[in-house]
Amino acid sequence: MRVNLTVNGRPQQADDVWEGESLLYVLRERMGLPGSKNACEQGECGSCTVRLDGVPVCSCLVAAGQAEGREVVTVEGLAEFARRRAGDTASGVRGGADASLDAARRWQAGGTDSQTGENIELAPVQQAFIDAGAVQCGFCTPGLLVAADEMLEHNPDPTDEDIREALSGNLCRCTGYEKIMDAVRLAAARRSEGATT
Amino acid sequence: MDFLRPASWEEALAAKAEHPTAVPIAGGTDVMVEINFDHRRPDVLMDLGRIGDLTEWEVGEDSVRLGASVPYTRIMENLRTELPGLALASHTVASPQIRNRGGVGGNLGTASPAGDAHPALLAAGAEVEAESVRGTRRIPIDAFYTGVKRNSLEPDELIRAVHIRKAEGPQQFSKVGTRNAMVIAVCAFGLALHPGSRTVRTGIGSAAPTPIRATAAEEFLNAALEDGGFWENGKIVTPSAVKRFADLCSAACNPIDDVRGTADYRRHAVGVMARRTLTWTWESYRGARRTTEGAA
Amino acid sequence: MTAIGAPTGLTQGSRTKGGIGESTLRPDGVLKVTGEFAYASDMWHEDMLWGQILRSTVAHAEIVSIDTGEALATPGVYAVMTYDDLPTDVRHYGLEIRDTPVLAHGRVRHHGEPVAIVAADHPETARRAAARIKVEYRELPLVTDEATATAPDAVLVHENRSDHHSGHVPHPNIVHRQPIVRGDADAAAGRADVIVEGDYYFGMQDQAFLGPESGLAVPGEDGGVDLYIATQWLHSDLRQIAPVLGLPEDKVRMTLSGVGGAFGGREDLSMQIHACLLALRTGKPVKIVYNRFESFFGHVHRHPARLHYEHGATRDGRLTHVRCRIVLDGGAYASASPAVVGNAASLSVGPYVCEDVDIEALALYSNNPPCGAMRGFGAVQACFAYEAQMDKVAAELGLDPVEFRRINAMEQGTLMPTGQPVDSPAPVAELLRRVKAMPMPPERQWESSEGADVRQLPGGLSNTTHGEGVVRGVGYAVGIKNVGFSEGFDDYSTARVRLEAVGGRPVVTVHTAMAEVGQGGVTVHAQIARTELGVAEVTIRPADTRVGSAGSTSASRQTYVTGGAIKNACELVRERVLETGRRKLGSHHPAWATAELLLEGGKVVTDGGEVLADLVDVLEDEVVEVEEEWRHRPTEPFDPRTGQGDGHVQYSFAAHRAVVEVDTELGLVKVIELACAQDVGKALNPLSVIGQIQGGTVQGLGIAVMEEIVVDPVTAKVRNPSFTDYLLPTILDTPALPVDVLELADDHAPYGLRGVGEAPTLSSTPAVLAAIRDATGLALDRTPVRPEHLTGTA
C-alpha cells in the first residue's frame, strides 16, 4: 500500500508498504530517517519515540497505515521543531552557551567546537545532553530527546521526580540515568535563565 | 494482509461484518507487538484511528460514556474526579508513550487478565457498549470476561464505548510489579466505595484466568459495614474486619505460577493491596464526611 | 554505490585544548543527538536483501531432517542455506574453543540455536520463508545442571573434545576447572573462632545492550566481502569469519558501524558469518537485524552460578581461611567460559588478606543458553557471594561490617590467592571509609504536605504503598576486578598515528581498530594524542581491519591498552618530528641539542617553555606516520593444579553503599541511593569516568532486584525473551548515584590509569542485597531477589 505523511515538516510518500510494517520501519528503511531507533519493537524502551500529531508515541507500535496523513517529528527534525517553537526571532541554542547551574559549569570544561555543538543548531535539550555527558552509546538518546523535549514544553520547571516519571518509558543501559537527569536539569535551567534575561 | 481504514463508525461496522477475522487496531500497543515479534499475522488489520467519536467522552448524570480509544493520558488528566479508580489505573499503564496511544477499548478487546483497566472497571461498575451492523448492546462488565484473553464479543462486534458509573465515593487502585514504572501487573487490585448504595466493589487483575471481583469479600464487608453502622457513624473499620476482607480477597484469587510471579505471592499481595486500598478509601470517606458535616 | 551509513572520521577541536584529565566532550556527540550517527542497524544499500535466521525450537535434539524446498520456492527469496551449504570444511567458530557450529549440524544443543538462514527482498518475506523450512527434531535428554552434567550416564554435550582444557577437566561436560590452593586451609580452620558457611545462587543476566545485533555484508568485485558490523573486537571476528567463508583475511574487510552498547555481549560472533555467507551466495548486499526477541538468543549471557563458601575468622576479626566452590553454567558452547572460570577462581576471596585458601571454580557444558562475557565476568558472581559471607562473619563476630572489612582489607603488597603480589595501590579500606563518610540521604523523602509521593516509594507509580510496611536498610560492599586479558594471553593493541600540516595547521590522525561501543574510547584516545603531540585538531579514523588489532573492548582494557598504544605511537611520532626539527632547524638554537623538548600548542618548546619552532614549519610537506603494536607487561597462566601464577596485569577496586527502602509486606524495593567510591588511578576524562561508574552501578542494581533470564528447568527453554519480562531498571528505579573518585597512580600503567568500566558492577549488587537484608532481616542467598523471596511466597 501507499502511505503519505508529513515528517519534520516535509511531505513524504512510501510505496509498496507491507501492511504489517510499523511507522518506525517506514521512517528508517523507506524514508532514510534512521534516527529513531529499533531497540525493542515492543513499546518497552522508548528509543523509537517520535511525536505523532504532537504527541510522543512509540513509532514501533504505530502501524504505517495509521500514520496516513499525520504529522511526525523525529529526532532529525527536533532542532528545527524547537527553533520554530521558540519563534523565528529567538534563535536556537548554540554550543557553549552558559549554564546557570553550578553543576553545569563543571561540565563546561570541555571544548566548544564543531563536533560538540558550536555553530550547529541544536535544540536546547540536544545541547544539554552533549554537555552533561548524557550520551554514551547513544542508542536511547533520540527517543529520550524527543520525550524530554516534550516534557519541558509543558513542564519547564520539573522536579526530579517529574523528570523521572516523564522519562520512565525510555530505557538506557549505559549511563545509569544520572547524567540524563543532569542533562534535563541543565536544559531546564538554561531555559529559565534565558526566560529571565 | 489487508489494511482497512474506515472513515466512520458505520464503515467500520460494515467492514467488520464483511471481515469477521479483521483485527481492530487503535493504539496498537498490543497488536503491533504481536506483529513485530511474528506472533500473529491477521488477514485484515482495521485501523480505528480515523473515527473521531472513539476518542471522545461524555460525562452524564450517573455515568461517563468513555470512547473506546480515549488515551489513558486523557483519562488521567480529565476524568480524575469522575473516574478516580480508572484514572489511577491509567497512570500505572506502561509508559507515557503507551498511555498516549492506548485506551480502555484495547484492554477490553485483548481481555488479558493483566490489563490494568479491568480491576478499576469492575470496582466502579461498567457496561461495555458493543455494536455490530445487527445493532447495539450493553454488556455488563461482570459478564464481559469469559476466559483467558477471551471476551463475550461476537465476531462482527466492535467496542464503541464503555459506560462507567461516576464515582460517588473514594476509589483506589494498586498494582504490583517488580519495577517502579513501566511494568506489567504481577497482580492488581481495584476498590470503590459506593456510599449511595452502601456497597463496596472490588476488581482483581492477573490473579485468575480472567479479571474478577472478590464477591465473597464484598458481601462480607457490605454486611459488616451495614451491621456496624459504619456508613453513618464514619468510624474506623475494625482491624479484624479489614483482615477478614483482605483474606477473602486473597481467597478469591485463582492464580498461576509464571515467570512474573508465584501463585502464592499473588494471593498474598492481593490481600495486602486489599487491606491498604480499603484503609485508604475508608480514611478518605471518613475525611470527606467530616468535611461535609463541618460545612453543614 | 557505497553503503549508506558507512562511518567517517570524527574530527574534533580546532580550539579545544582537550588533553588528558579534562572532561572533553564526545567527538560523536552531535551525530548522536541529531540522529545522524549510523548504527549497524541503520546501514542501507541499494538492492540489499534481508537475512533471517531460523532457530531451534527445542534445547537438545537430533535433527532428523531439514526441508528447505518450500522456503526456496517463496517469491522474493534469494537463498536458503543450512550446514550442508557451507562453503569450506571450517564450519565452527568460537572465541577460544571452536566448538560452535555456524549452522546446526545434525544436532541442536540449546534453545534458539541457528539452524538455517534465508535471504529475501523484504524482512517479512524472509520471516515467512524461514517459517516454511521444515525441521524434524528427535529430542535428546537434557543436561541442565551439575548433577545432570556429571552423572555416570550423562549425555556429552560435546563428544570427542580435543581443546586444550579437555586434558585436565574431570568430566567432558566441564569446560574448564581452576583450583587454587595456597597455605593450609584445614590447619587454618583449626585456628578459627567462628566458621560461617553459605550457599548462594547468582541468576543469568543479559547484557541487554539497546542496539540489537545487526550488520550489512556487501559482496566485493574481487570475490571478497565488506562487512559493516557492531562488535567489540573486529580482528577476533575476522579470524573466526574468514576461514568459514574460505577467504583470506584481507578479503574480508571489516568496518565498525555504530555500536549500541555491548557489555560483553558482542565479544562472540552473532550474525557476522550468516550475513557474509548470504551476501557471497546471492551476490547482493545483505542486512541482518535481530529483533529483541531474537537478541535474547543471539548472544551469550552472564553465567549463572552456584557458589558454596566457608569463611573462618578469629575473635578479633581476622580471616583465617576461605574455602569455596563456584560452579558456573556455561551452557551449550564454551565462549569465554575458561576466562570466566579463571577470574572467578583468582578473585574469589575478594580484596582481602587471607593466607590459607582452598578454591575451586569450574564451568559446565549444558543445554542451557550459552554464557560468556559480561561486564565483570566471573568476578561479579564471586563478589556477590564473598560479600554476603563477609557480612555474615561480621554479624557472627558482633563486628560492624565495614570495620570487619577494614581489618581484612588488602593493600599494596598483599599476595593474591594465586601468590601474585598486588604491586600498585589497593586502597580498599580507604574506599570503604569514603563511601561510609558520604552524607546519608534524608529519611522519608516521599512525605510531603500533599501526602505521599508514590514515585519515591517502593512500587512507584503502581501506587502500592503510601508508607505502610516501608523499612529502610543500609548495606556496604567492595570488590576487586582484574583489568586486561590475563593468564598469559598476548594482550596487545595497535595504533597508527599520523602527524601532518594541513592548511597551515598541524593535524593528527589516529587510526586503531578499537571498538567504540559507547564507553568513550574515541574521546579519550583523542585526548591522549593532544597531550602527547600538542596538537588540538585530532581526527579519529573509523575502526576497521585495515590497521592491526586493538584487542577487545572488554575487561576494562581499552583506555589502558589501546590508549597505551596511542601514547606509544605518539611518542615515536614526536621523536621523529624532533629529529626532523633538529635536522632542519637545529643550528638556529642551541636548545635543539641540549634541552628536553616537548610539543605543545602546535609548537616545539623546551621544558622551560621557550618556543623553538612552529610544528608546521618543522613538518612542511612531511607526513610523519607510525604504526606500532603495544603490550602491557606479560602475565602467566595459572598452574592447573595449584592456581599459582602472576596471572593478572592490574586490579581495579570500587566500594558501594546502598540505601534502600523495602515494602516488607509486598516485597518491593526502592533503592534510595547507591553511592560509589572507586580508585581510577588517573581520570583521563572525569566526566566519562563518572559515567562509566554510574552505568556499571545500575547494571549491578538490575541484577540485584529484577534482571534474570529465566530458563525452564524441565525444557531448558528461555521463558522471558523480551523487555516485557526481562526487566531493566527504568529511570524511576534508579536512585541518586554520588561518586567519589580516587586517583592513586599505578606506576605500571600509562599515566597511572586504572581500567574503570567493570569494578562498579561488582560491588553494587552485594551492597543492595546487604541493604535489603538489613531492612528485612532475611538471609537472601540469591540474586536477583524477587518479591516472593521477601515475603515467604517463593
Image (tube, coloured by chain):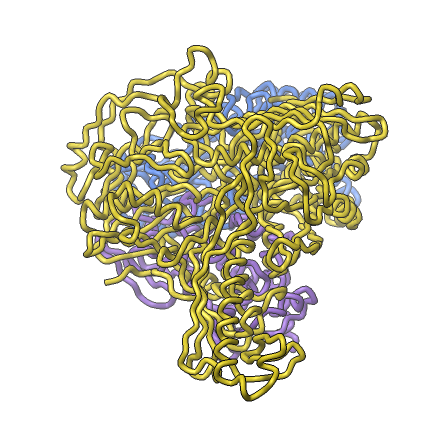
What x and y, as percent, mark residue C402? Answer: 78, 38
Please state which of residues B238 and B44 is positioned toward the viewer in this rendering: B44
The image quarter in which residue B88 lies: top right
Q: Colour of chain A?
A: purple
Please state which of residues C439 and A126 is positioned toward the viewer in this rendering: C439
Name which residue lies at 46% across and 61% down: C32
Vertical comparison of B113 with C597: above or below: above
What x and y, as percent, mark residue A103? Answer: 68, 64
* Identity of the residue furthest to the top in this view: C152
Q: In the visual, does B77 lie left or right of C194?
A: left
Please state which of residues A86 and B124 is positioned toward the viewer in this rendering: A86
The image quarter in which residue B174 lies: top right
What x and y, as percent, mark residue C648? Answer: 59, 42
Name which residue lies at 52% across and 71% down: C575
Vertical comparison of C556 with B178: above or below: below
Chain shaded blue? B
Could one spot residue B135 in this view of the protein? no
Instruction: Look at the image and tell me in which quarter the C terminus of chain B lies.
Output: top right
Chain shaded yellow? C
